[in-house]
Image: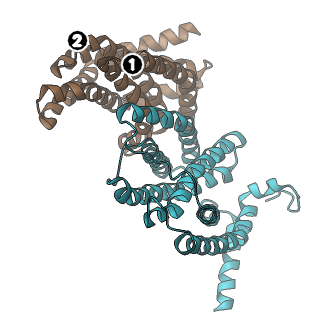
Chain colours: A brown, B cyan
Amino acid sequence: MLSTFLAVLRRDLLLAWRGRADVLVTLAFFVIVVCLFPFGVGAEPNQLRAIAPGVLWVAALLACLLSLHRLFAQDYSDGTLEQLLLSSEPAALWVTAKVLAFWLSTGLPVVAVAPGLALLLDLEQGALPVLVLSLALGTPILGLLGAVGAALTLGLRGGGMLLALLVLPLFVPVLIFGAGAVEAEMSGTGAAAHLLLLGGGLAGALALAPWACAAALRISTD
Amino acid sequence: MNAPERSRSLFRFAAPHNFYPLAGRLAPWFAAAALVLTLAGLWLGLFVAPTDATQGEVYRVIFIHVPAAWMSMFVYLMMAFWSGVGLVMNTRLSFIMSQALAPTGAMFCFVALWTGALWGKPTWGAYWVWDARLTSQLLLLFLYFGFIALTRAIEDPRRADRAGAIIALVGAVNVPIIYFSVQWWNTLHQGASVSVTKAPSMATTMLVGMLVMAIAAWMYTIAVVLWRARSMILERERHTEWVGAVLEREMQAKGGRA
C-alpha cells in the first residue's frame, strides 16, 4: 500500500519538477494578485495592514483554484488515469498521493513566499508565523476539496469556470478561519481556536475527500 | 416493461413509465392546492393580520420571505436525499427528482434574498448586511448554481446524474460547516448592531398566515417538480415504445377535445 502511495507521489513530483514553468506561473500569479491590491485600495499603510490577511488568503485561494485543473487533466488525456482506476490498488490511496504531490508543488511554494509578501503589506512581524501556519493547514484543504471539483469537471468544455463555481462556495469556511487566525493574532485574542478548527477541517477533508474524489473520477471516466 | 404491472408495492412508481402518469394525475391537484392556499395566505397576511407594533407594515414581507427561505433550505436537503438514493439504489428517477428540484430551490433562495433586501432597506437602512443568515443563504444560492451548471454542462445524462449527485452530497456535508463558520465570522467582525430576531411575541393570525403560505410553497414545489420530472422523463425516454404510445394518446385526447 505504502509503496503505491510513494510511487504515485514520486511520479507526480517528478512530473511537476520537469514542468517547473507551470509551478512558477502559479507562484507569479499569487505574487501579482497580492501586488495589485495596493493599486486598487490605495497605499495607506494602516489600511493595507488591516486587509493584509484577507488579501493574502484570497490570493492563495485563487492561485490554488487556477492550478487545480492540472491535477488530473494530463493523466486523463493520456490515459494514465484509466490505468490507475483499473489497477487493484484502492483509488482513495493514490488520489491522496496525487493531491499531496499537487500541494507540495503548488501549495507549499505559496506558503513559502507568503511571509515575504506580507512584509509588502506591512503585516506585523509577530503575526507571520500564524500566517504561515494557517496557510500550511488551510491550503491542503483547498487542494482536497478542489480535487473533487476537478474530478467532476474533467474534460468538460468551460470546465475552468464551472470548477470555480463548484468549489468557491466550499472554500469559504477555510478562508474565514485562515484569514481569521491572522486577524485574531493581530488583535491579541490568540489564533489557537482558528488554527485548531483548520486542523480539524484538514483531518475531516483528508478522511472524506479522497473517497468522494475517487467516486467522481470513476464517474468522469466511465 | 416486463415488470409485473399489478404489483402493489409503492416501489413500482420508481419506474419512469409508471411514475409518468401518476405525476400527471397528481400535479394539477397540488397546483390547485397551492393556488388556493396562496390566495388564503396572502389574504390573511395582507388584510387580516394586524400591523406590527415596531416594524409597521413592512413586516408583511415575511409572508413571502420566511416560507421561501424555509423552502430553499428544505429543497436542498431533498435534493441531497434523492442524490444519495440515486447513488445507492441506482434508480434513474431519483436523479431526475433531484435535478427537477434544483431550479425551484434556487428560485426560492433568490426570492428569500430579494424580499430580505426589500425588507432590510426600510428596517436596517441597507439592502444588504453581511449577516450570518444572509451570507449563508447567498452561499446556498451559489451551491444551487453550481449543481445546475454542472448537470447542464455534461451531455451524457448518466454522467450528469452521478456527478450532480456527488456535488449535491458534498454540498450537503458542507452546508452546516458553512453556516457555523459564517456565523462565527460574523460575530467576530461586527457586534450586535443588527439583529434579525423578530419581535418576541407574534400575533396568532401572523403565525397562521405564515404557515398557510409555507404549505402553499410546499404544494407549489411538489406540483412544479412533478411537471418538470414528467418532461425530463419524456426527454430521456424518448426512444422507448411507451413514450411513443403516451404521446400518441395525448395527441388524440387533445384532438378529440378541439
Task: Give the residue displayed 80% in from the left and 56% down from the top.
Answer: B12
**Are both tags, 1 and 2, on one chain?**
yes
Label disc, if present, on residue A103 of the rendered structure: 1
In the image, residue A48 above or below residue B215: above
In the image, residue B150 above or below residue A193: below
In the image, residue A168 above or below residue B103: above
Label disc, if present, on residue A150 of the rendered structure: none
Q: Chain of mark 2?
A: A
Q: CA distance from mark 1 to mark 2?
A: 26 Å
**Disc 1 element:** helix
Q: Chain of mark 1?
A: A
Residue A178 in the image, given as x and y percentages of width and height: 37, 24
Q: Amino acid type of disc 2?
A: Gln
Task: Give the residue displayed 58% in from the left and 54% down from the top.
Answer: B201
Furthest residue in direction top, as rendered: A3
Residue A54 in the image, given as x and y percentages of width and height: 29, 29
Category of crowding for the residue at label 1, using alpha-carbon neighbours closer than 10 angstroms: few (below 14), some (14–19), many (at least 20): many
Label disc, if present, on residue A125 of the rendered structure: 2
Question: Which of the two residues, B243 or B98, is positioned nearer the viewer here?
Answer: B98
Furthest residue in direction front, as rendered: B53
- Look at the image and tell me in which quarter the N terminus of chain B lies: bottom right
**Disc 2 element:** helix
For residue B26, side relative to residue B76 (left or right): right
Task: Give the residue displayed 74% in from the left and 56% down from the top.
Answer: B15
The quarter of the picture where residue B193 lies is: top left
Q: Amino acid type of disc 1?
A: Trp
